[in-house]
């Protein structure tokens, strides 16, 4: 399904439904509109999202509320140190045919066989279990005992992690971080939002979230997002941005001084797809420089590895990206408008 096979009226109806998703989530989540938009961008781009924030910022509630606004199967897995790979992907169980008495092994699907998988506190479980998600996230399928099992469509992994308490945690390796399309940082609410949180959560009023989008709607939206236009100068700009994160030949002094390893080609793909998704969310079928800049931090912050000097000077990846966006000149107007 694309713009040639779907009418303008249908496109408009899908965009209206998409705008209603944020409103439904807003019944429960106060503020955090930028975080919700980034989650929607990840969904439209067909990628997975990692949310990082201190405890108590409603990361889990935000993901579950988003799932309720979508008529999709939703599963939550609390990642713990004793969680095994089979607890996620499934295992074989021995069954008996009641007619013949013959015994056989049957694959029992795990919680990963869902549309939205909430991997809560993903850095609490050992690397062996974290790696069990790799094939599912990248290939949208699971292999067990020599057989492959396709996951439902659409399929998203929305993971959370706590950056403060590091005791008993297993930081995600770079190879797995790269599987996440977006690394979203969840900050503290504003003073007004915090007052509203107190008002909503200390009474008896319970908000009901209605399902707005179905699985077929999301698949259609994902195809429409890929139809969003990107001008050739923007492809060049994205390529220059990604290549500039690599310290060997970067024109940015901040990169050469503080970066150990830069982003790979997958970062460029993520920048383009997320820029397309942002444009579509705003009702446009053409991307701009502003779209790329708006998604740059969430796309690049987990794909740039800082060196020891950066750690010694307490430099953050976001500050390197800020400098990068200043050092790499964008295309001229009207693409940036």
Image: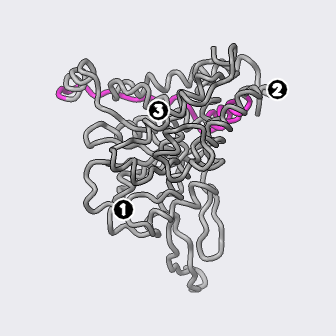
Where in the figure is residue 50, as x and y percent of width and height?
A: 45, 45
- Please state, as top left, top right, bottom left or bottom right, where the C terminus lies in the image: top right
Judged from the image, the secondary structure of the residue bearing numbered disc 2 is loop
Q: Report if residue 225 lies within the magenta region.
A: yes
Report which residue position mark 1 lands on.
170
Stretch of the chain drawn in magenta? 202-227
Report crowding for label 2: few under 14, some 14 to 19, many 20 or more residues within 10 A (C-alpha).
few
Task: Tell which tag, 3 or 2, sits nearer the viewer.
Answer: 2
Where in the figure is residue 220, as x and y percent of width and height?
A: 68, 34
Q: Is residue 281 left or right of residue 177?
A: right
Q: Is residue 328 above or below residue 315?
A: above
Task: Please give the name of the residue rendered at 33% of the width and 44% of the height, measured from the top-left corner.
Answer: 314
Taking the view exactly as shown, the residue that stands out farthest to the right is 4
**Lower sequence index among marks 3 and 1:** 3
Report which residue position mark 2 lands on.
4
Judged from the image, the secondary structure of the residue bearing numbered disc 3 is loop
Q: Report if residue 245 lies within the magenta region.
A: no
Report which residue position mark 3 lands on.
69
Task: Please give the name of the residue rendered at 51% of the width and 80% of the height, measured from the top-left corner.
Answer: 94
């Amino acid at each position: 399904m694309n713009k040639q096979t779907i009418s303008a009226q249908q496109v408009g109806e899908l965009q209206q439904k998409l705008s209603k998703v944020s409103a439904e989530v807003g019944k429960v989540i106060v503020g955090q509109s930028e975080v919700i938009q980034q989650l929607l961008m990840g969904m439209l781009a067909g990628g997975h999202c990692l949310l990082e924030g201190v405890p108590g910022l409603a990361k889990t509630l935000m993901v579950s509320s988003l799932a309720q606004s979508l008529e999709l199967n939703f599963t939550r897995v609390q990642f713990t140190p004793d969680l095994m790979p089979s607890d996620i992907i499934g295992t074989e169980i021995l069954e008996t045919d009641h007619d013949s008495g013959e015994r056989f092994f049957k694959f029992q699907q795990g919680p990963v066989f869902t549309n939205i998988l909430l991997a809560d506190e993903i850095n609490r479980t050992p690397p062996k279990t974290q790696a069990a998600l790799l094939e599912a996230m990248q290939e949208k399928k699971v292999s067990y005992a020599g057989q492959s099992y396709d996951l439902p469509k659409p399929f998203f992994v929305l993971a959370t992690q706590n950056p403060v308490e590091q005791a008993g945690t297993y930081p995600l390796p770079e190879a797995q971080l790269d599987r996440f399309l977006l690394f979203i940082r969840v900050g503290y609410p504003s003073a007004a939002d915090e007052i509203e949180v107190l008002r909503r959560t200390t009474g008896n009023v319970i908000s009901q979230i209605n399902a707005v989008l179905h699985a077929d709607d999301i698949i259609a939206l994902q195809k429409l997002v890929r139809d969003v236009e990107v001008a050739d100068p923007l492809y060049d700009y994205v390529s220059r941005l990604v290549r500039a994160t690599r310290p060997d030949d970067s024109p940015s002094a901040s990169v050469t001084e503080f970066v150990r390893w830069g982003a790979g080609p997958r970062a460029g793909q993520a920048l383009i797809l997320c820029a397309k998704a942002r444009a579509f969310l705003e009702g446009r079928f053409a991307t701009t420089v502003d779209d790329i800049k708006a998604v740059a931090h969430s796309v690049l912050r987990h794909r740039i590895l800082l060196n020891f000097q950066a750690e010694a000077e307490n430099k953050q990846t976001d500050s390197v990206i800020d400098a990068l966006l200043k050092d790499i000149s964008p295309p001229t107007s009207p693409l940036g408008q």
